[in-house]
Image (cartoon, grey):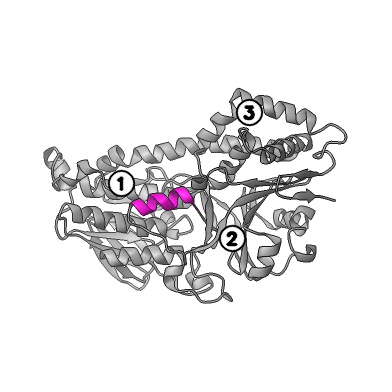
């Protein structure tokens, strides 16, 4: 929500000197937002809402060549969308009420699959529930959705209703001028703006162009991922996957995270790691743990697939005079909760532009602290995923984790330390720093050491390849 202390701010209040005045937006100023995904749409929504509270009359042009009402590549924004209940609640406080049509399926649990067995992890708290969504309008052969039934389409409509102008053009260049930024499109369209907000994602060539403009800017570091959709039908999905997101902890080099996410008539597969390639995918699809998740242990042909690149290192810096980068184009969470990071960076950038100014100094003082906080947490996240990679390589460690988690799931009162850590790591519901600090708790360390011993004893459920979660028995081999 817009903080009360901001409501009384005049447009130029609190700015000292002529230099600060020069960066203040005025009535008639124009803002260009490049990219109409969650970050771009939320920035436009927050910016126009905040400007309205102080009577600032500005125009917002959103440049987006895609149309999210189209199925398949023309409306694709990478189908693997997950939102947490806590994010849904935060958006609601901002006036962004996600309709039921946006949520394809509620996720009530994670099912962790390993070569030593499976275990189902129930949601620890109601506010930590998650939901699967379509970012665009789904695969080419899916049933057509109303534009507002996709998450991105819904947010775009909110921005439009606030007054944003949608321009379906591809931006190819952004150039600084004396008191403006000029935006150039592939069809020779050009216009001038007092502020340009880059929310195009890391797959846009625009970031490469901006990097070549100056030696003082480095675009985000990237890695290649893999996403595909399997069409199974709602009844088959209900029987074989249930309301659970299926996560795989397998001994496959360079694979950091793999999950099957049920949504409507489709199941989305997401593979994250170090430049996913054909060799890695072949090992993944040939593993018994993956094949056994599908009816008849046969993996069907996928309806569509893509190899999007994701941000693994923030842009540096994510701003300059009259230019700011948000979401994946700037700073985002490593591997998880990209939509949550889009919300946080979009709101912080909008607040800076409206109440403080659009100069590099303004963004350094009021926007950069959030980016640095996200970046510091990502460094901890890299360490956490490195530790998880060691677990993937150690069979005795996987048995201990399976045994500890399965026992916790049978308990109704005792703390579920391993279960909660795994839930937050898989979902991105908590910061990596929070997750790491909880692994240092003496009770967690003691419980893990005990289960590493017990889980590897001859005759234990983990040793024999099955574990009971309290809901069902998962039997392997």
Image disc number at residue 320: 1
Q: Contact, CB < 8 Å: mark 2 with mark 1?
A: no
* Mark 2 residue crowding within 10 angstroms, few (<14) / some (14–19) / many (20+): some
* Mark 3 residue crowding within 10 angstroms, few (<14) / some (14–19) / many (20+): some
Residue 393 in view here: yes
Residue at left offset 77%, top offset 37%: 399
Pick the residue in front: 338 or 133: 133
Front: mark 2 or 1? 2
Mark 1 and mark 3: Cα distance apart in space? 45 Å
Residue at left offset 72%, top offset 26%: 449
Is residue 276 rendered to the left or right of residue 296? left
Q: In the rendered structure, which segment of residues is drawn in magenta? A: 84-93
Front: mark 1 or 3? 3
Instruction: Please report whichever mark, 1 or 3, sits nearer to the chain's N-terminal start.
Output: 1
Front: mark 2 or 3? 3
- Vertically, is 5 above or below 32? above
For label 3, the residue is 444
Image disc number at residue 402: none
- What secondary structure do most residues of the magenta stretch adopt? helix
Instruction: Please report whichever mark, 2 or 3, sits nearer to the chain's N-terminal start.
Output: 2
> Residue 452: image x %, image y %?
75, 30
Rendering quarter of residue 41: bottom left
For label 2, the residue is 307
> Residue 30: image x %, image y %?
22, 60
């Amino acid at each position: 929500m817009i903080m009360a202390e901001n409501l009384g701010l005049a447009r130029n209040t609190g700015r000292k000197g002529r230099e600060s005045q020069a960066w203040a937006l005025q009535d008639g100023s124009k803002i260009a937002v490049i990219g109409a995904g969650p970050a771009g749409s939320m920035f436009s929504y927050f910016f126009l809402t905040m400007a309205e509270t102080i009577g600032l009359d500005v125009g917002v042009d959103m440049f987006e060549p895609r149309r999210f009402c189209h199925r398949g590549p023309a409306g694709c924004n990478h189908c693997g969308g997950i939102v947490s209940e806590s994010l849904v609640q935060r958006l609601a406080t901002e006036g962004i009420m996600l309709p039921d049509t946006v949520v394809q399926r509620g996720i009530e649990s994670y099912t962790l699959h390993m070569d030593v067995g499976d275990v189902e992890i129930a949601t620890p708290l109601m506010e930590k529930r998650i939901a699967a969504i379509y970012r665009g309008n789904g695969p080419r052969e899916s049933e057509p959705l109303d534009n507002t039934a996709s998450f991105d389409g819904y947010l775009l409509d909110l921005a439009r209703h606030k007054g944003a102008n949608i321009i379906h053009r591809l931006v190819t260049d952004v150039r600084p001028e004396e008191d403006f930024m000029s935006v150039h499109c592939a069809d020779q369209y050009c216009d001038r703006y007092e502020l340009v907000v880059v929310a195009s994602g890391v797959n846009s060539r625009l970031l490469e162009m901006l990097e070549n403009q100056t030696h003082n800017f480095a675009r985000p570091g990237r890695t290649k991922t893999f996403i595909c959709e399997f069409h199974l039908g709602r009844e088959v999905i209900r029987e074989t996957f249930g309301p659970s997101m299926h996560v795989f902890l397998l001994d496959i080099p360079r694979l950091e995270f793999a999950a099957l996410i049920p949504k409507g008539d489709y199941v989305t597969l997401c593979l994250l790691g170090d430049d996913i390639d054909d060799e890695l995918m072949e090992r993944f699809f040939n593993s018994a743990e993956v094949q056994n998740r599908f009816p008849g242990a046969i993996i069907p042909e996928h309806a569509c697939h893509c190899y999007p690149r994701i941000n693994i290192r923030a842009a540096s810096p994510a701003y300059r005079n009259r230019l700011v980068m948000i979401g994946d184009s700037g700073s985002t969470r490593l591997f998880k909760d990209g939509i949550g990071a889009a919300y946080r960076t979009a709101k912080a950038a909008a607040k800076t532009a409206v109440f403080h100014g659009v100069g590099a100094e303004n963004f350094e003082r009021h926007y950069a602290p959030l980016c640095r906080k996200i970046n510091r947490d990502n460094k901890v996240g890299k360490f956490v995923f490195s530790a998880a990679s060691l677990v993937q390589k150690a069979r005795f460690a996987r048995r201990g984790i399976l045994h500890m988690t399965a026992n916790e799931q049978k308990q109704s009162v005792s703390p579920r330390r391993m279960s909660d850590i795994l839930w937050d790591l898989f979902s991105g519901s908590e910061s990596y720093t929070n997750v790491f600090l909880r692994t240092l708790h003496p009770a967690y360390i003691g419980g893990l050491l005990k289960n590493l011993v017990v889980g590897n004893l001859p005759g234990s459920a983990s040793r024999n390849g099955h574990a009971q979660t309290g809901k069902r028995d998962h039997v392997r081999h």
